[in-house]
């Protein structure tokens, strides 16, 4: 059992940090670029990647509402202020306009996940 | 300068089977029937096939399964699976193999029974771990996100999207093989059930059964067959992402890269093109590909398709079989782009036959706007 998430591969490390209540991103020391989803290599090819705390703020790039008989929920692409994009959902609302500023929080559960709330 | 692959191979046989609904048949059985049709179309025997190119949504090793089912012993085979764009890529791969002398008679084939087997899109596609927590519904979520972004950025409207579906239905109404026929208005499309905003059920492709196969040979042999050869003029692929999360700009597909390279290989410009076959899994596809392939500026696709521009009688003939929206969509529709191009270029398209059909541009799409493969086919006049 590996206790330190940083010693895991990027996918398991991200999930292990989430389980500990932390939203972490990989960042290259040399180039300063952030990487999402977490990978062993940055788009530039850099592998000098450290886990850093995400600022947690971003902007809605695109959003859709998946409508099913049993209910509906939104799926969004959020551009994080660090310059990377992630799939997520905006919690507690049916939808928000593209361009809405949002803030991340960790939604606890069997599999914890990042969700966003609009910034008032 | 003429590209060394331009005009070097040709489709000499084309077959389809199980178009629409084929209850009681497996995907491989339908595929087999389409191969039989393709062989009968060109007068070749099963044993003449010495190269197999295949992809399906239900066979992990498609060429292997086809080889066994048909009892072939090919010298060359390729199961490249880049979703619905696989078959346009197979045209290029088969041309390379034929031209290199590695084989003489290439079969490209596909089959699916997804409508009668379950009525939903079948996929062997694995979930993307960074997307799974948000329960995207594949493939529509990705296309809906791209549509939402295009509307936001360029003012494209739901009416524009609906016009794509209406145009496709207009063509389908001229095609007895099309699955969805009958009148369809903009209001009908807008009034359908919302599935994933801003896409209604009317913006989504059909879920049908269907199989198709074609036979390719080198051009020097192609004139010896009963029907006029349909020449390979060019093809190119481009792939920048897999999951929608990783698509750099949701309003620009990799067809903006594959398109120009395919045009260059084929040595053609836009004014040379008589028929445009675009993989229309959703109405936004047609708009995006018209832009990315240079038929209109980026962002203008919605306005471009308005009021029947791509419908029968319009300025540009697009998806004359009725497309994935109204003709046939068994999951990996790319093979049917080829089938319609062949029908039009041969002059076999019946009521929907274009007055001139010497050069067809095809754009296959795979994944969530991921793999794009553009191909150009033409008649002897185009050589």
Image (cartoon, coloured by chain):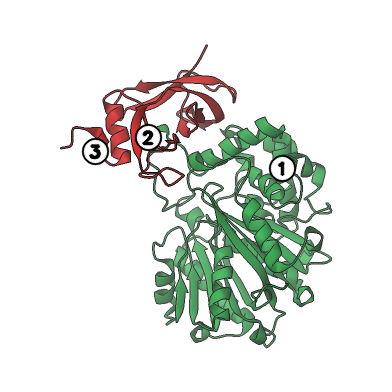
Chain colours: A red, B green
Apparent side of residue B354 relative to residue B263 in the rendered image (left or right): right
Task: Tell which subunit mark 1 falls on.
Answer: B
Distance from Cα at disc 3 to Cα at disc 1 = 45 Å
**Residue identified by numbered label 1:** B298
For the residues labelled 3 and 1, say whether their Cβ atoms are less than 8 Å apart.
Answer: no
Q: In which quarter of the image is residue B228?
A: bottom right
Q: Nearer the viewer, mark 3 or mark 1?
A: 3
Identify the residue at the far top of this view: A120
Above or below B277: residue B137: above
Q: Which of marks 3 and 2 is nearer the N terminus?
A: 3
**Residue identified by numbered label 3:** A7
Task: Report the front residue among B239 and B78.
Answer: B239
Residue under disc 3 on the same chain as residue under disc 2: yes
Apparent side of residue B180 relative to residue B94 in the rendered image (left or right): right
**Residue identified by numbered label 2:** A26
Q: Position of residue B314 (x, y in %)?
A: 83, 51
Distance from Cα at disc 3 to Cα at disc 2 = 13 Å
The number of discs equals 3
Structural crowding at the residue carrying mark 1, measured as other residues with C-alpha within 10 Å and reported as few (<14), some (14–19) or many (≥20): many
């Amino acid at each position: 059992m590996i206790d330190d998430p940083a010693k895991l591969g990027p996918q398991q490390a991200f999930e292990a940090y989430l389980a500990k209540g932390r939203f972490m991103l990989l960042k290259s020391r040399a180039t300063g670029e952030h990487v999402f989803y977490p990978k062993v290599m940055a788009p530039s090819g850099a592998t000098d990647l450290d886990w850093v705390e995400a600022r947690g703020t971003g902007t809605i790039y695109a959003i859709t509402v998946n409508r099913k008989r049993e209910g509906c929920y939104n799926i969004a692409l959020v551009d994080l202020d660090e310059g990377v994009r992630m799939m997520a959902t905006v919690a507690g609302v049916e939808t928000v306009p593209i361009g809405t500023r949002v803030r991340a929080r960790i939604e606890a559960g069997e599999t914890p996940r990042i969700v966003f709330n609009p910034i008032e | 300068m003429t590209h060394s692959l331009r005009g070097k191979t040709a489709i000499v046989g084309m077959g389809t089977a199980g178009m629409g609904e084929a209850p009681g048949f497996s995907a491989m059985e339908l595929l087999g029937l389409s191969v039989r049709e393709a062989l009968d179309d060109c007068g070749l025997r099963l044993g003449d096939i010495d190269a197999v190119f295949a992809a399906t949504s239900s066979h992990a090793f498609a060429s292997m399964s086809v080889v066994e089912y048909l009892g072939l012993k090919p010298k060359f085979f390729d199961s490249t699976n880049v979703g619905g764009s696989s078959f346009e890529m197979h045209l290029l791969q088969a041309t390379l193999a034929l031209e290199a002398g590695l084989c003489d008679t290439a079969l490209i084939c596909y089959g699916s029974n997804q409508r009668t087997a379950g009525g939903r899109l079948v996929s062997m596609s694995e979930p993307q771990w960074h997307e799974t927590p948000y329960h995207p519904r594949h493939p529509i979520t990705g296309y809906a996100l791209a549509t939402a972004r295009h509307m936001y950025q360029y003012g494209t409207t739901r009416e524009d999207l609906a016009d794509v579906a209406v145009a496709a239905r207009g063509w389908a109404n001229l095609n007895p093989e099309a699955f969805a026929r009958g009148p369809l208005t903009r209001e009908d499309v807008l009034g359908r059930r919302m599935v994933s905003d801003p896409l209604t059920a009317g913006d989504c492709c059909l879920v049908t059964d269907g199989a198709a196969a074609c036979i390719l040979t080198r051009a020097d042999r192609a004139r010896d067959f009963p029907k006029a050869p349909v020449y390979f003029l060019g093809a190119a692929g481009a792939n920048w992402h897999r999951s929608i999360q990783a698509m750099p700009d949701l309003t620009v597909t990799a067809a903006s890269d594959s398109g120009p390279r395919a045009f260059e290989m084929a040595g053609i410009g836009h004014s040379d093109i008589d028929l445009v076959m675009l993989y229309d899994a959703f109405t936004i596809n047609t708009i995006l590909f018209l832009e990315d392939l240079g038929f209109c500026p980026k962002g203008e696709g919605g306005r471009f398709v308005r009021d029947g521009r791509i419908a029968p009688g319009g300025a540009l003939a697009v998806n004359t079989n009725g497309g994935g929206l109204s003709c046939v969509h068994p999951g990996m529709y790319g093979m049917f782009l080829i089938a319609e191009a062949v029908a039009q270029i041969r002059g076999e398209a019946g009521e929907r036959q274009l007055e001139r059909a010497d050069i067809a541009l095809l754009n296959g799409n795979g994944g969530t706007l991921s793999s794009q493969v553009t191909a150009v086919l033409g008649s002897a006049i185009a050589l």
